[in-house]
Image: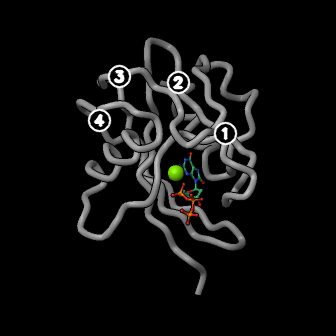
Amino acid sequence: MKKQVHVAVGVIKKANLIFIAKRHDEQHQGGKWEFPGGKVEAGETVTQALARELNEEIGIEVKSSTPFLEIHHDYPDKSVHLDIHLVEEFDGQARHLEGQDHKWVAISDLNNYEFPAANVVIIEKLQTN
Ligand SMILES: Nc1nc2c([nH]c(=O)n2[C@H]2C[C@H](O)[C@@H](COP(=O)(O)OP(=O)(O)OP(=O)(O)O)O2)c(=O)[nH]1
Ligand SMILES: [Mg+2]
């Protein structure tokens, strides 16, 4: 059976800007842009996983997050369950601690970046809200 992963994903928003990072070439869906996040580990809630991943990857302390969207997507080699949360309250300066290229992008400019196929719906929802 295909590998299945449950991923906590953060749409980090500051005014009209969203933080995105470029996946390393050797990662699954490598070379594409992503919203930061990572796998939910055994015994963790999604909220806990989100806070841990965003602290490990981009060095922020999440103060609150709200559920935004859940997506189930089948890639040829992997099935993902993305649990996407909006993060508008956090402490610290977002940067990338795992060496990924990163930037703050206007919501209207997200279309200029290549994201994994599962992300299309996230971007549509951000642009219609
Ligand atoms: N973080 C994140 N992952 C995404 C997005 N869209 C999307 O399809 N994914 C997929 C790619 C990966 O298969 C999975 C994220 O898991 P991860 O970041 O922990 O995975 P990884 O590639 O580092 O895998 P691993 O080597 O740790 O096993 O979800 C997104 O916007 N953000
Ligand atoms: Mg990750």
Marks 2 and 1 sit apart, C-alpha to C-alpha, by 13 Å
Q: Which residue is mark 1?
A: 22
Residue type indicated by callout 1: Lys
Residue 32, position in %: x, y? 72, 44
Rendered position, 64 above or below 82? above
Left/right of residue 78 with respect to residue 112 in the rendered view: left
Q: Earlier in the sequence, mark 2 or mark 4?
A: 2
Which residue is pictured at 33% across the width and 53% down the height? Answer: 49
Q: Which residue is mark 2?
A: 18
- Please, which residue is most extreme toward the top here? 15
Left/right of residue 50 with respect to residue 121 in the rendered view: left
Q: Which residue is mark 3?
A: 92
Give the position of the N terminus as an image quadrant: bottom right
Left/right of residue 62 with respect to residue 79 in the rendered view: left
Q: Which residue is mark 4?
A: 65
Residue type indicated by callout 2: Ile
Marks 1 and 4 sit apart, C-alpha to C-alpha, by 22 Å
Q: Are marks 2 and 3 in contact (CB under 8 Å)?
A: no
Crowd around label 2: few <14 · some 14–19 · many ≥20 (10 Å) = many
Residue 60, position in %: x, y? 36, 31
Which residue is pictured at 55% across the width and 43% down the height? Answer: 98
Which residue is pictured at 54% across the width and 64% down the height? Answer: 80
Marks 2 and 4 sit apart, C-alpha to C-alpha, by 14 Å
Marks 4 and 3 sit apart, C-alpha to C-alpha, by 15 Å
